[in-house]
Image (tube, helix red, strand yellow):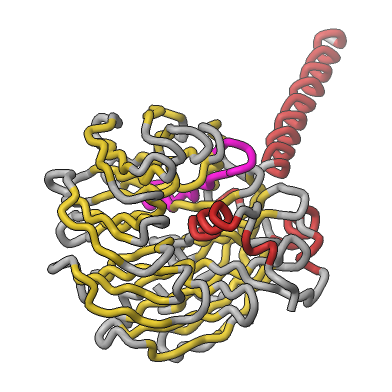
């Protein structure tokens, strides 16, 4: 809705994940938005252009961050189940559906459930404030494609392909 | 009089405490789990699709052979549909109102009716189908067969395979571009994007991108296609493909 493309970069379980916003007109990165560790999936709110990022924290818990499409800043975060890997947006009810791979459940998050990141985020993802650790990307575009990671990992015989990437 | 007013005060305190406890526990629940609802589904939920026609959400449980159906209005489980083994990809076809499920380990695509939430067809495709995209113009369904290196094209009207298109090694993601009617396929093992014309179901271009393309989206605003390249040995990049020329017009280095 704002003409930007969002790319999720994993923090490999140790550092902050970043969602980069690329301008569709200039094809340059216009914002690097810190989110939780290991952002695995993105979905856009088709009604207002906000972007939701699913993060898997180092302790296995999951968070969903809401990024404003107009400011490219984090507006809030919500705790969900373990290892959230996929998102869908219910445009009828304006809710985000989250597939929690690690807890065999689906979380349904309403816009009102997002707490300001200053309270929720620091308590659940200390990496959020830990500064610029090396971030090696597991990449997903808005609308997300973790399938790639998982499929690749099956073929390459590792638990998660991106986690075997060398540090940079 | 005194006695009854003391009771009144006690009752007031009890009521106030209950309200406080209630508020506290609601707040506590909210803080402990920010979700509005948590719905138990099958093992290893891996992919989701929202059906705007019936308002349901379809959940592919990769650790089993089921799809959980959640009502978007009540947020409760309304059906568990048996599909093939290890469903990984799920997509809603707005043209026929059906949901397509790629069963990674059984070489099939299950077709679920959005009106009955039952399987109406099982379609044999190539080896290890992983991702699905729908041609929003005619309702045809494109299935990336990861091990086969092919894309199966399923007619949305007959639910029969009408074409099998050879692409590059390791197709893992695909997207339909409504602007030009092409389907873009990310071949992770060859660093290329295969462009399939949806009208002829043939490859009309093979576009080299960065190492490890794993995801892509079509930008309906500018007609470009953005490809995320996950490079184990170098920089991760995003390739920008012009939808009009099917060539790379820009490469954005991510890290």
Q: Position of residue A160 (x, y in %)?
A: 64, 56
Asked if the magenta segment contains residue A75, the reply would be no
Residue A85 to residue B60: above or below: below
Q: Nearer the viewer, residue B157 or A39?
A: B157
Q: Nearer the viewer, residue A143 or A168?
A: A168
Residue B67 to residue B4: above or below: below
Q: Residue at x 57, y 66 (%)?
A: A67
Q: Position of residue B133 (x, y in %)?
A: 31, 58
Q: Residue at x 29, y 81 (%)?
A: B243
Quarter-of-image position of residue A104: top right
Residue A123 to residue B245: above or below: above
Asked if the magenta segment contains residue A102, the reply would be yes
Total marks drawn? 0
Q: Determine if residue A85 is in view.
A: yes
Q: Residue at x 15, y 58 (%)?
A: B138
Q: Quadrant of the N terminus of chain B?
A: top right
Q: Position of residue B74 (x, y in %)?
A: 43, 33
B204 to the left or right of A51: left
Q: Nearer the viewer, residue B124 or A12?
A: B124
Q: Quadrant of the C terminus of chain B?
A: bottom right
Query: Which span of residues is magenta-colored?
Result: A89-105
Q: Residue at x 51, y 72 (%)?
A: B212
Q: Determine if residue B114 is in view.
A: no
Q: Nearer the viewer, residue B126 or A134?
A: B126
B191 to the left or right of A55: left
Q: Position of residue A137 (x, y in %)?
A: 63, 71
């Amino acid at each position: 809705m704002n003409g930007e493309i969002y790319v999720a970069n994993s923090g490999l379980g140790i550092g902050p994940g970043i969602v980069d916003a690329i301008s569709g007109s200039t094809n340059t990165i216009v914002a690097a938005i810190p989110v939780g560790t290991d952002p695995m999936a993105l979905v856009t709110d088709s009604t207002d252009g906000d972007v939701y990022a699913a993060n898997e924290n180092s302790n296995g818990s999951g968070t969903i961050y809401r990024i404003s499409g107009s400011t490219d800043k984090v507006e809030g975060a919500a705790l969900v189940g373990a290892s959230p890997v996929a998102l869908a947006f219910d445009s009828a009810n304006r809710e985000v559906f989250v597939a929690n791979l690690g807890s065999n459940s689906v979380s349904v998050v309403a816009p009102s459930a997002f707490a300001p990141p200053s309270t929720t985020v620091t308590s659940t993802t200390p990496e959020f404030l830990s500064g610029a650790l090396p971030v090696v990307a597991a990449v997903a575009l808005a609308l997300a494609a973790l399938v790639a990671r998982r499929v690749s990992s099956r073929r390459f015989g590792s638990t998660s392909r991106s986690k075997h990437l060398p540090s940079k | 009089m005194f006695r009854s007013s003391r009771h009144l005060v006690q009752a007031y305190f009890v009521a106030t405490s209950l309200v406080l406890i209630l508020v506290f526990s609601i707040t506590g629940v909210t803080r402990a789990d920010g979700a509005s609802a948590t719905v138990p589904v099958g093992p290893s939920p891996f992919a989701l699709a929202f059906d705007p026609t019936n308002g349901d959400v379809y959940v592919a449980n990769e650790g089993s052979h089921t799809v959980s159906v959640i009502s978007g209005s009540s947020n409760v489980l309304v059906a568990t549909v048996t599909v093939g083994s290890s469903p990984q990809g799920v997509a809603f076809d707005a043209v026929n109102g059906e949901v397509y499920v790629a069963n990674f380990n059984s070489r099939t695509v299950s077709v679920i009716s959005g009106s009955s939430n039952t399987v109406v067809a099982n379609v044999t495709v190539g080896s290890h189908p992983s991702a699905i995209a729908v041609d929003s113009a005619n309702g045809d369904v494109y299935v990336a067969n990861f091990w086969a290196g092919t894309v199966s094209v399923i007619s949305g009207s007959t639910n029969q395979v009408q074409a099998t298109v050879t692409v590059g090694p390791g197709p893992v993601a695909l997207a339909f571009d409504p602007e030009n009617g092409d389907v873009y396929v990310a071949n992770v093992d060859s660093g290329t994007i295969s462009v399939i014309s949806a009208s002829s179901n043939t490859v009309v271009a093979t576009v080299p991108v960065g190492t490890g393309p794993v995801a892509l989206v079509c930008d309906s605003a500018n007609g470009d296609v953005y490809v995320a390249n996950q490079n184990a040995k170098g920089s991760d990049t995003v390739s920008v493909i012009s939808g009009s020329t099917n060539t790379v017009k820009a490469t954005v280095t991510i890290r």
